[in-house]
Structures are given as C-alpha cells and as structure tokens.
Amino acid sequence: MNDRTLDVLELPKILERLAAYTSFSAGRDLALSLVPTTLLDEALELQQETTEARLLLEEKSNITLGGVFDIREPVIAAKRSITIEPSTLLDILTTLRRASTLRRQLTRMRGQVPRLAMIADLIEECQAVQEEIARIVNDRGEINDGASPRLAIIRRDLRIAFERLQSKLASIINSATNAKYLQEQIITQRNGRYVIPLRAEFKGRIKGIVHDHSSSGATVWIEPTSTVELNNAWRELQLEEEDEIRRILTELTRMIGHESDFIVRTVEIMARLDVIFAKALYAEAIRASAPKLTGFRDMAGKGVAGHPGSVLHLPEARHPLLNQDTVVPIDVYLDDDTYVLVITGPNTGGKTVALKTVGLLTLMAQTGLHLPTAEGAELSVFEGIYADIGDEQSIEQSLSTFSAHMTNTIAILEACNSRSLVVLDEVGAGTDPAEGSALARALLGTLQRRGVTTLVTTHHPELKVWSHEQPGVRNASVVFDLKTLAPTYQLVIGLPGRSNALAIAKGLGMSEAIIEEARGMITTEAMIADDLLDEIHRTRDDIRRDKAMIAALRKETEQAHAILEERLDNIETERRQLLAQAREEAQAELEDLRAEMRRMRRRLQAAGQPLEALREVEGSAEDLEAEIEQPITRATSLPEGFVEERPLRLGDLVWVHSLNTEGVITEVSRDEVEVQIGRLRLRARLDDVSARSKGESKRGDKPAQKPAPSQPHEREAPPQRAKSPGLELDLRGTRVDDALPQLEEYLDAAYMAGLPFVRIIHGKGTGALRKAVQDMIQTHPLARSWERGKPNEGGDGVTVVLLATHN
C-alpha cells in the first residue's frame, strides 16, 4: 500500500482523531505516524493491545499517563554535556516516576492484560536518576540546600550576610537624622545592589554610590557607603552559589547523559502505551467492536475456482468519519463463491461511501483499531491495499482526469497480487461510455483471473450482466427510494442497481411525452433487463413484507397459545382452591354442630333427665351429625376417577423445596427422583418435591415446604436450614465492582442453605468479570474448589463452585 491509498481512504483523518485522545506530545506524534501492518501476527498483537486497554477502561482503572513529558531532546543533548535546567529536571523526574508507577500497575494485572504487561516490562525505571534528581531539585524546580555540602555552607553564609546588610540599611532609614532626606523609608534593589531612595535636593547628605534616579529626577537611589562592603560580601556569596549550582547541574547532566538511552526508550514505551489507551478511548467514542483477523484460507475443494481465500465480513459497518448517530450502517460480506463485488446505483446513493467504508475499516483493523461495526466482524490481513477513488461523476470530465485514473490503475495492476485488496471507484469513467465499459470489463476480468479481492463501483450497465455471468463476481447495489426521490444509503448484495434516470425525471415533473420518447430510444434488451430487474426488486420487497407479516402472525399465535395454557392452568388451580375452601367451610360448620351437641348433653344432664332419654338424644344427635357430614363429604370430594395426589412421573414439572427452585423429573425410583434443573441433574427425596403446574411456574409461585409426617416419640428435629437462594447466580451485564458484593452475599446464602454446589453465570465477554469471579472463589473460605462449566453448561461463560460442607 502507498501514501496515496492512505490519503484517498482518509486514514490520516482517523489518526488525527486518534491523536486527540493521547496524553502527551510523543504519544500524539506516534499516533499520527501509524501505518497499517501487513503481517497477521503483528496485527493480532495490535488488536489484543487495544482490547486489553478497553478492558482496563471498563473496570474504571485509575491508570493514566498524566504528568508525562517528551523529554527525549534534553536527555539526548545531555550526552553532549549541554546542562539541563532545573525545570526540565523536574519534567524528567515526573516522567520517570509516572513510568515506574505504570509499570507496577500493569505487571500486577498480568493475568488480565498480558500483552500490556509485556510492554510495560520494557520500561526502564532509572531509579538512581530519579533519586538523584529528587535529592537535588524540589517540587518547585529549585535546587535544595542539601544538594551538596558546599552549597549548604554557602547558603548559610548567604543568609547571615543578607541579614547583616538588611539590618544596617534598616538602621539608616529608621534614623531620625536621615528621615528628612529620604523620599520613603524603604529598601529596594537596583542593578543587583540594595539601595535606599533619597530626595534629589538632599543628594550628598548621606554618603554613598548613586545607582539610579527616577524619571522625574526627584529621587535618586543610593547605596550608602557604610553598606558597600556588606553588599559586596552578599554579592560574592551569590556568585559562589551560582557557581556551585552550575557544578551540581553539570554533574547531574553527566549522569543523565550516561542513562540517556534508557530514558529515551522509556519515553518511547510510554508513547506506545499512550497510543494504545488512545485507541481504546477512540473505540469507546465510536462504539466500535474488536474484529477477528485471519489469514488467507486454503480454498482447495471449496468455493469457486480462483478464490484467493480472503475473508471480508463487516456487519452493520459505519464510516467512522460520519455522524455515528445518523449514518446508515451497511452489511458487506464476501462468501466462498465471491471475491469481486461490483456495486451499481444512482449518483449520491452511497456507492463511494460504501467503498471507502470497506477500504478504511480494513486499514484501521491492520493498524490495531477497533471497528465501528456490530459484533462478528471478520477480515483477512491483506499484504497490500490499493485504492483509486475520485469524484468523476460528470460528463464534463477531462482527458487529463481519465489519464490520471488510468495511471493510478496501471500502478495498482503492477503492484497487486492474490493477497491484495483493490478498491476502484467509477471504473472506466471519464471517457467514451462504450470504450469505458469495455475497458472496465477487461480490467475486472484481469483482476478476477489473478484472484485479487476487488470492490468496484460503476455506472456501466454492461457490467451488471458481466458480473452475473462471471464466477467469483457478484453484483451489489445501493437502494434508491423512488417515492421520496432520495437515496437510502443501504447496500444490497446479490442484486444490481436499477436505472432510475427516467423514473426520477418523471417524478420531478418531466413531460410524459419526453419520457416516452426517451424510453423509445433505449434498446429493447436494456428495457427488458431493467423491467426484469424492477420485477426482482418488487418480488424481493413482497417477500420481505410477507415474511414480516408471517413473523407477526406467528408471534400473535404464540401469545394466544400461552394465554390459553395459562387460563387452563388457572382453571385447575381455582377448582382446587374452591374445593379446599368448601372443605374448610364445611368442617367449620360441623365443628359448630358438634359444639351445639355438647351443650345439649350438658343441659340434659343438668335437667336430671333419665339415662335412657339421654342416650336417645345422643343417638339422634349422632344420626344428625352423620346426615350433615355426608352431604359435606359429597360436596367436597373430587370427581370419580380423579386422584389429586397422583404419583410423580417422568417429565413432571416439580418444585424442589430444599433448593427453592423448579425442575423436570428425568428418573423416578422408590424413595427419590432425579430432577433436571437447567443444565444440572441431581437426586432429591420424594418428600422434598411437589408437583407444579405450568401456570404456577410462569407466575413464579413458590409453594410452601411439604410438612413431614408426624411420628410417635420422634426425636427433636434438627435446626432448619436457611432459605435456598437457588443453584444459579447470573452476573451477566454487571460491572466487576457491583458483581463481587453480590457474589459474596450469594455464597453465604448458598452455604447456609446447605447447597452442595452452585453455578455462577458471568458470560464470556472480555473476560474481566470471569477473572474477577474466579480470583475471588480461589481464596473464598466457603468454596472447596471450582471448575469451568462443561460445553453443555455454558463453557467458559460459567463457573461451577463446590461449596464447603457443614461440620
């Protein structure tokens, strides 16, 4: 690939946007200089780096490159003994400290981001340099007193000399004798010497050296004679201080010069990491997904003859330079029978945008950028990507324009091979239509025979027929809405574009006579082909509408079926509830009657009736009780042949009380049953399960625990276990910070409920949540061991935890 292809497909504009997310100038320069790789392994590594950086962003990591500077120039200059200033030394120190911190952060997360950790291992911390700079320079960029013993002595003497000088000057200006000569009672500096302001008319009253005067001439600044020696001593110490600081900086510069190669390498590694994190931020901004990059496949015995084995699948692809909220996504794919795609359609219909989208996204993928597509994008890594895209969409194109395009096309033909991607816009345009069409077919035929993956756009109708007849070549088109006379920008693969010129002209109000005259000038073959194409498009639209209608009817039918099933389940449930209520009411009435009987007996006994009369009344009461109880029993009994508590059978839906969940019976034995719960199977006692209707399952009703049969002289029951939280915890869609507290609470509840094992559903995704869950389980006191889910249980998206047993 060449610079012209990168410019035509607008990769530099993408790099400009990428550079806006970098943190310092070296990272920005590196981002702007990125070029796509042609090596599969390198492209995979670049993609992995971006994925790992997005993983860190997803976890809200505090990793940042703030406080990093491009210090390469002064560090390289240090090798030539060019002294580094204190402010620059401070930049070097903050950069090296940030590099050390980043190295430790990334290496600690090696399990999650192995690629970034490997890059961070290359950082040279230069600890000795850091310590020496920190010892010499403070946070304000000043040289510390302790930078050297001599500097400490000089600064001590300097403070003493300064205090003596200031004390002497203060005594002069505060003297009552001198007060009338002074303009103000202040001490200031002129030419590095401390002076006092004297009125011009009293010049000479205080002996001294004149250093300056005011613009009006009313004030002169003099250095009193009595302070000259003190000023000299203070100034000499200042010069000694400057000499010592210069010596210290020279020594430190020499040390940095010796370490310059390591420091420069660290800055370059930091710039590389800066670009990687910028890629992650840019991917988030454009809602991108990671593409799957593959090599060229071996097509022996597969697909069409001559297929190079390239892969190109871009679902819902969006051009990254367009507004991501309004751009119309396109689906582009080349199957095993296609490696040349010919796109036709009206002007401004989106052909060129579709072409640029494919070319640009391929370049981005090979640069390590994630793509603005739906999940599942897959691309081959091409050894060369070549594009010739222009704006030739007018009959006023000149010969020079045609010549320029031909020059580019010739260069592409010389450079491309079966592992290249060629993108050509308006092939054969800019010259006589007949010759241009013939040239376009010959050009595409050459690319097809050489097995070059090719995407082209064209206006030549002859290419539609040619594409239909040639193996490995397929038509595609952009859709135009004749009702609104506007393009929809949708790409349809498999159908060539229709000629809409006459329809558009008619829609815009062109005379019907002119339209018919123009139609008569079109060849019969062209009209038949266009009418047939129009019929194909209408048939396709009808099929789509029918499919949508069938899908809607199927959905309505399924909903109605579900409602009927629920109603039937509710009827059975309501019947049982009514029978139970009637039984309770009858039992209550019977108890009232028995109480009345007992009262009657007591009253008869109290009245002193003979024993025979009392027995007669009791017999009558018992007959009455039997007569009353009989109709109650009949009213509350179930229909003949109906067994309310029938034995459990295979396929029955049951509720497992100890696990607080439902399942389906897969095996029945004398004392227990085997129940399938999700993908798990377990055995349960018969008294631990109860039948469950579909209606109860849909409503989520939870039946009460079945009471155990009472036994005479039974031992004290063991303590009841806590309520089961269920065998599964679904954490999909939850961030790590929120998921871990949920997991902790769930494991506690599962252990208290006595569950032998649980399943944690975390999904596959980027792997961050899975790693956090498994790290926590690894050291959790309630977990005996864990294993990944089996393929039929969800594979890597599920972790099965064996819980500790109660003592």
Image (spheres, rainbow, N blue to C red):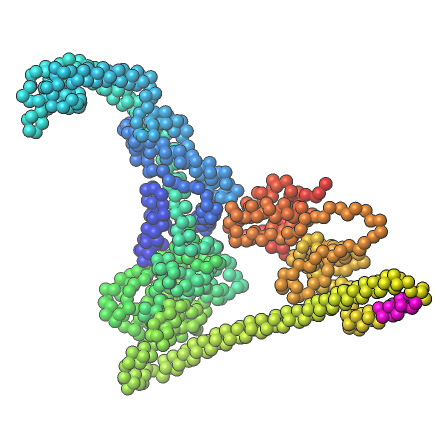
Seen as rendered, the residue at the extreme front is 607
**Residue 427 versus residue 499: which sits nearer the camera?**
499
The residue sitting at 84% across, 64% down in the picture is 600
- Residue 54, image x and y in percent? 45, 48
Picture layout, residue 261 above or below residue 438 = above
Q: Is residue 343 visible?
A: no
Image point (54%, 48%), residue name: 739
Q: Position of residue 159 (x, y in %)?
A: 27, 18
Q: Is residue 603 above or below residue 757?
A: below
Q: Residue furthest bottom?
A: 513
Identify which residue, 525 or 98, lies in the foreground.
98
Residue 266 appears in the rendering: yes
Q: How many marks?
A: 0
What predominant SS class does the magenta segment belong to?
A: helix
Closer-to-camera residue (691/716): 716
Q: Quadrant of the N terminus?
A: bottom left
In the image: residue 718, left or right of residue 110: right
Q: Quadrant of residue 256?
A: top left
**x and y percentages locating residue 260 in the rendered image:** 35, 31
Magenta stretch contains residue 624:
yes
Q: Is residue 56 above or below residue 630?
A: above
Please name the residue shown 36% across and 43% down the image.
Answer: 23
Q: Quadrant of residue 538?
A: bottom left
Observer-nearest of 384 and 270? 270
Q: Percent position (x, y) of residue 79?
A: 31, 29
Q: Residue at x 39, y 47 (%)?
A: 278
Whether residue 228 appears in magenta in the rendering, the answer is: no
Quarter of the figure with the C terminus: top right
Find the magenta span and give its range: 613-625
